[in-house]
Image (cartoon, helix red, strand yellow):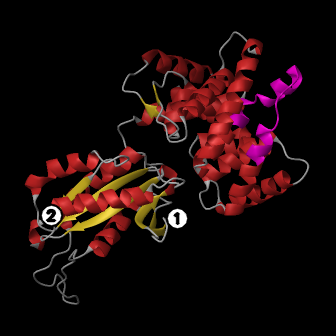
Amino acid sequence: MLHEALRAVAAQAETLTSAGPVSIAFYHWVLGEGLPAQQSAGMARELCEELSGGGRSIHAVAALGFLLSIDRTLSDACRDSFAQGVDWLMGRSGDSQTALVSLMQPLAHTGVLVGLSATADGVRWTKFGTWFASLYARLQPLLPAEVGWRHELLSMIKTRSEVGLDGELTVVPASACAAVYVARRLADAAPAVDDDFASRLLSRIKSVVYDDPEQAAVDLAAFHYLAQGAAQIDLRAPSLDDVGLLLRRLPSGLRRWTWDDQKKTPNSTAQKWAVENEYHFQNLLCAVLAPVVPDLRDEEWLASVGQKKPRADLVIPSLHLVIEVKYWRTRSSPQDLISQIGEDVSLYLKRGSPYRKVLPIIWDQGRRTEQYDLLIAGLSEIRDVVSPVVIAQPAFMV
């Protein structure tokens, strides 16, 4: 029965894909589904043209915001058009009651918030939060007493925008909209569990009666989040914690690493895949991460700091994360390693950087396991360093 109900709800949600650009983009964003590159680029191009002309609208700004989150390969021109659209939107004040109501569109403002997060635009994020809070305060007396999905979305937008772009919001997934924020990495999940919410959500889904396809999509996304479980790695959209968990499990994958004492087949030669430097280690990490992190980039040049032009080893733009790859040679001390990483963090996360966290991963040539606890504790004390990982070189490589 639940399976049939889910299929019916999914069919209602899917009607959004036959509507306008903001509905299409919202559908793919809320359910974590990608768009074909050609369709995404075509939609973005049309939206940019609309925003540059006289027919711009809050819906065009929102749709482009969703697309920037879905497709990280969209051009800088799309980012500029979105920023200009946000500036135009914040110039509207909603002086009359009619204008105010027309401005307060939960779906559209969610798209703006999502786009600002995707572009890491801290300046506009702050301005948008102030502007939205003013509108929300004036709109509250006009809201219906019944709390529906629109009211929940408005409340989540206000709460998330108040925290700040780099701030961390922790919520109990006690509503479908809160669960969506956690699933789409706009908030972290509190350890508490709201069983009443899960029961209410299942009742709504089993009833298969939705007035709005948007609510059907939100409920479906919330159900997917609850069903997959917060402790499991979502291979479609790994979180920062997922990346740390995957890297900490790396040693288990080295059990079958190629290290031949003699050739295995008549037509081959004995191979020893030695990890002899940072570049070898970085290649190994790319092989592990690239299949599950589509936007993984390596050797990324970052903005200059004076005469210094820093280059990050690996970056994941969707998580605003730099992965700092280090090869800890036998002759090097832990003090040297901590100093190098501390200096690099300050360069990577300079003011205006699109990145917010650094995850150091270290290949220990000397297998100094007795040093790991203190080393990891020390690295964790550096501001914005998360989940340090140390990999001991396998014994067979010694």
Give the quadrant of residue 97.
Answer: top right
Q: Position of residue 113 (x, y in %)?
A: 64, 39
Could you tell me if the residues under marks 1 and 2 are in contact, i.e. CB atoms within 8 Å? no
Residue 17 horizontal side relative to residue 96, left or right: left
- Callout 2 secondary element: loop
Q: Residue at x 77, y 14 (%)?
A: 142
Query: In this view of the protein, can residue 8 be seen by the observer?
Result: no
Give the quadrant of residue 362.
Answer: bottom left
Magenta includes 96?
yes
Magenta includes 10?
no
Residue 159 horizontal side relative to residue 54, left or right: left
Crowding at mark 1 (Cα within 10 Å: few <14, some 14-19, many 20+)? some
Q: Mark 2 sits on what residue?
A: 333
* Magenta-highlighted residues: 85-110
**Residue lying at the far front of the rendered structure:** 306
Q: Residue at x 68, y 41 (%)?
A: 112
Q: Residue at x 55, y 36 (%)?
A: 164
Instruction: Check the picture and name the quadrant holding the C terminus.
Output: bottom left
Q: Mark 1 sits on what residue?
A: 303
